[in-house]
Amino acid sequence: MTDTHDTNLPDKPVELEEDKKTAEVSEPATTETPAEATLTDKPAESVQKLTKEEILNKLKEIATDVENAAKSEIDGLKQAFYKLHNSEQEAAKKQFVENGGAIEEFVPQADALEEEFKNTMSVIKEKRSALNAEQEKLKELNLQIKLSIIEELKELVESPEDANKNYTEFKKLQQQWNEVKIVPQAKINELWKNYQLYVEKFYDLLKLNNEFREYDFKKNLEIKNHLCEAAEKLADEPDVVSAFHQLQKLHQEFRDTGPVAKELRDEIWARFKAASTTVNRRHQQHFEALKETEQHNLDQKTVICEIIEAIDYSELTNFSSWENKTQEIIALQNKWKTIGFAPQKMNVKIFERFRKACDEFFQKKGEFFKSLKEGMNENLEKKRALCEKAEALKDSTDWKATADELTKLQKEWKTVGPVAKKYSDAIWKRFISACDYFFEQKNKATSSQRSVEQENLEKKKAIIEKLTAIDETTDVEEATQQVRELMKEWNGIGHVPFKEKDKIYKQYHSQIDKLFERFNISASNKKLSNFKSSISNIQEGSPQALYRERDKLVRACENMKNELQTYENNLGFLTASSKKGNSLLTELNRKVEKLKGDIELVKQKIKVIDNSINEAE
């Protein structure tokens, strides 16, 4: 809102009748300018680019000359300073949490610049308060002066026989009136009405001094024409707020200027009023557009708060899910920074709501990782104990008993939770190396299986021949049934000689692919069937390869589940806030369905491995 020491005019443009009879004077509006304070909420673009040190230096300059400083400039610098200050504090808090600290234990470091900033602002505030007090005293003094001028004019009017002789005194009073400027806001209209009343009455008493009257009317007309031109030029002023304030000064000059010839009064006032209306309309439209933009910003920020507040923490049960959700929060924080200010009365509230939601997330994340770290240390000790047991068994030649024991250790390993990433690879390599060493020695000692493997090779060749015999004339349903039975038979046959396994495997899958294409058997069945066939090859390379393959599939399944959760969250967000997101919704739904299918296929593969492990035992 306009500072009382900057102007003595009402905050809203005053539409005054030109100095006619008192009864014809239009009352000025008394409501405040719409949302004018909003301007001071937004630092100018140049201010936003300053550093904290540069902002502080500017405020120190202002402190030496407070009388000529605009409140909007001071507020803009203050807001820009705290925007930088808060950004630094948030970055420090984020770094503290990322380094493993609990958010409730974070203590902001003292900022020497902030302390100096507060001291400088206190000086400015004290000086402005003193200036305002002086302004109020001056207004009261000016009020008394103007009241005394009106009383003197009244005396002149009440002495009609001396009107011509008193003309010089009358002009002196007029000049004195114009030299006295600001008075209390509530008294402006009443003073002006009374002043104009007695001025008119005095002119009406003038009979012998018509040449003075006409000369005065002429000079007043020149001044008011100049004021009309100045008001009309304001329609092209780029800065609508500056134009509005300039117009207030022109109104003050217009009302302080004496009357013009009676036949020209309506015309000159109509011209000035029309120019004022144009400026006032632009000013109103500017703030309406600003208000609409700020409301849109508030809506966007509200949606972001709702997304963060709706997080289901019960679903964040592992490192991956927390990290994925953290990236979402960071993306929302970055989005927040690109959105402008909300309406002044809500700007602080919506930011506090946003900060509270983010703080709660990072606090819970800190608590989770604190407990996870403790659990990981326990898991590491358990896995080290399993490594020691496996290493103690790796040189055993009791193949059956030792194989059973190592298999139990591997199952137990799967029940132990994760360890810290820096230990994960090393501890797993230590454990699996001991297991692999034993089973490699066991394989060398069981070479008698070669004859069985040769028989298996012949059986698989026979299956390939049967698959090749299925031609295009075979009924689709019958062919599909034959293929499935042969595939089932293939999967039931044991290992083949190692040197032959790749060749026979390629021949089999080459023929299967042709049949799948020919009879359009579903891609999921094909992938699952291919995977079942590959199990025997995986086992031939190393019995422990199945466990590695299973771990890989479990990790892949978890990643796909997290990705699915992200897409489903995004679907909910778009549904709530987007009016034109049909194409994006369609694409996201397609991805969701595909992910669900992929997850189901991976689960089937894990089931196949588990069955193979159980059969091997």
Image: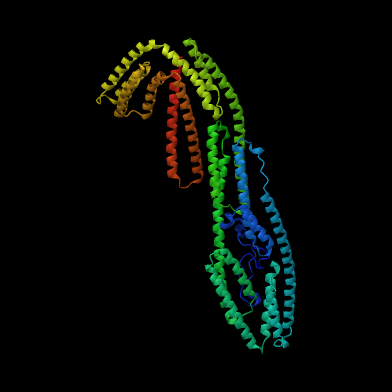
Snapshot quadrant of residue 326: top right
x, y percent for residue 234: 55, 69
x, y percent for residue 259: 63, 79
**Residue 255 or residue 109, whichever sits in front:** 109
x, y percent for residue 364: 61, 35
Relative to 584, does residue 415 appear above or below in the rendering? Answer: above
In this rendering, would 67 be left or right of 362? right
Q: Quadrant of the N terminus?
A: bottom right
> Is residue 96 visible in this depiction of the protein?
yes
The structure residue drawn at horizontal position 54% and vertical position 22%, both measured from the top left corner, is: 415
> Is residue 480 visible in this depiction of the protein?
no
The structure residue drawn at horizontal position 65% and vertical position 58%, both measured from the top left corner, is: 59
Relative to 31, does residue 304 appear above or below in the rendering? Answer: above
x, y percent for residue 98: 59, 37
The structure residue drawn at horizontal position 59% and vertical position 35%, both measured from the top left corner, is: 365
The structure residue drawn at horizontal position 57% and vertical position 76%, both measured from the top left corner, is: 226
Relative to 127, does residue 551 appear above or below in the rendering? Answer: above
